[in-house]
Image (spheres, rainbow, N blue to C red):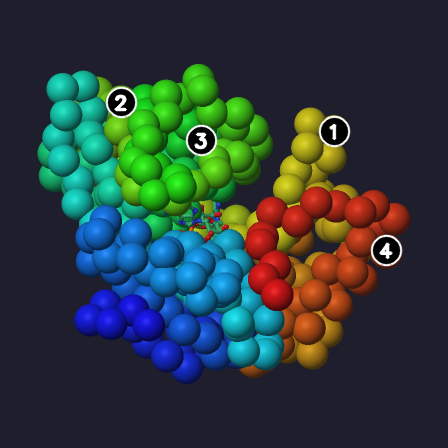
Amino acid sequence: MFKNIETIKNADLKSYNTFKIGGRGTIVFPKNIYELKRVIKECKNNGLDYFILGNGSNLLFPDYDLEKILISLKYFDKITEKKSGIYIEAGVNIYALNNFCLMNKFDGLEWSFGIPASFGGLVYMNGGAYGHTIFDFIKRIKILKDDKIIWLKKYDIPFSYRKSNIEGIILGAEVKLKKTDENIIKEKQRYYFECRKKSQPLNYPSAGSVFKRTNDLIPAKLIDSLNLKGTKIGGAEISKKHAGFIINVDNAKSIDVRALIDYVKNKAGIDFEEEIILLN
Ligand SMILES: Cc1cc2nc3c(=O)[nH]c(=O)nc-3n(C[C@H](O)[C@H](O)[C@H](O)COP(=O)(O)OP(=O)(O)OC[C@H]3O[C@@H](n4cnc5c(N)ncnc54)[C@H](O)[C@@H]3O)c2cc1C
């Protein structure tokens, strides 16, 4: 299977997610759309499930070996200037995107500086921060669905909070951005990163906020009010700095994080919806 396509079998999945948790699995790295289509076809022909892996910053892998084939789009990493913005491929890292914006004087995405994601993952999750989300800037999205390449216009996509509801593989997207002075961009990036450092436990592995907020409920506030900060199961701990984060303090296992999630739900008496994706 996947002949002549870069593949890592028996990969240690701990190295492919920001939680640093997981068993082993197979990761395929198609270099272009033809290879990507072939990987999908071969998965289907062999009855194998596949899962698109971004930067693994919103995932919790199981401790056992994953049967699903992970497909990484890290080679889809080009950014191209367009008339009133840029086209960004799915595998572009958000740090690289911010660097490109700074170098080319594109203003608007500074709030994303410090999110350890790929662009495809940010779009899929409708990621956001400090009052902005990526969908505020999206014009249209290029996806691969049923072996066809399709352009989706923003308003044809039923996106919601931290959810794009996109069915298909995101190949890239056009975003609308204005040009401005690079010092303004630099200052905004610095400011947002400082905010992040102040509020988030960036010195420990995590997958960001574990639970989704809703209009009426901010899980981190409730968890804090229940004095659950610092609660530990195995190597997983509710961050003392940000109650919405579970951090890996000591070789945490997936089951530790899952048990801590259940513990929080029980204590709060609320079946919070997870923002992180739990893979089985
Ligand atoms: C320290 C830290 C801070 C964070 N801060 C924020 C924040 O401020 N705001 C925020 O919104 N999130 C934040 N997150 C969470 C996370 O970074 C986001 O959810 C991000 O969008 C996930 O992107 P990823 O590339 O890592 O995707 P992954 O975690 O690899 O995958 C997430 C989902 O996206 C899907 N996916 C990925 N790429 C594609 C594609 N090309 N096509 C289709 N589906 C795809 C995957 O299949 C999976 O379902 C933070 C995480 C950490 C660890």
Q: Looking at the figure, which quarter contains the C terminus?
A: bottom right
Residue at 42%, 27% (x, y): give it. Answer: 135
Residue at 23%, 68% (x, y): give it. Answer: 5
Residue 216's label in the rendered image is 1
Distance in Å between CA atoms under marks 4 and 2? 44 Å
Residue 86, visible in the rendered structure:
yes
Residue at 48%, 79% (x, y): give it. Answer: 24
Residue at 33%, 66% (x, y): give it. Answer: 28
**On the rendered structure, is 28 left or right of 58?**
left
- Secondary structure type for disc 2: strand
- Secondary structure type for disc 3: strand
Give the residue pinned by disc 4.
267
- Residue 111: x %, y % from top left: 38, 36
Q: Nearer the viewer, residue 66 or 149?
A: 149
Look at the numbered disc 2 and say if its residue's Cβ is closer than 8 Å to ligand 1: no
Between circles 1 and 2, the one closer to the viewer is: 2
- Secondary structure type for disc 4: helix
Q: Looking at the figure, which quarter contains the N terminus?
A: bottom left
Distance in Å between CA atoms under marks 1 and 4? 18 Å
Residue 247, visible in the rendered structure:
no
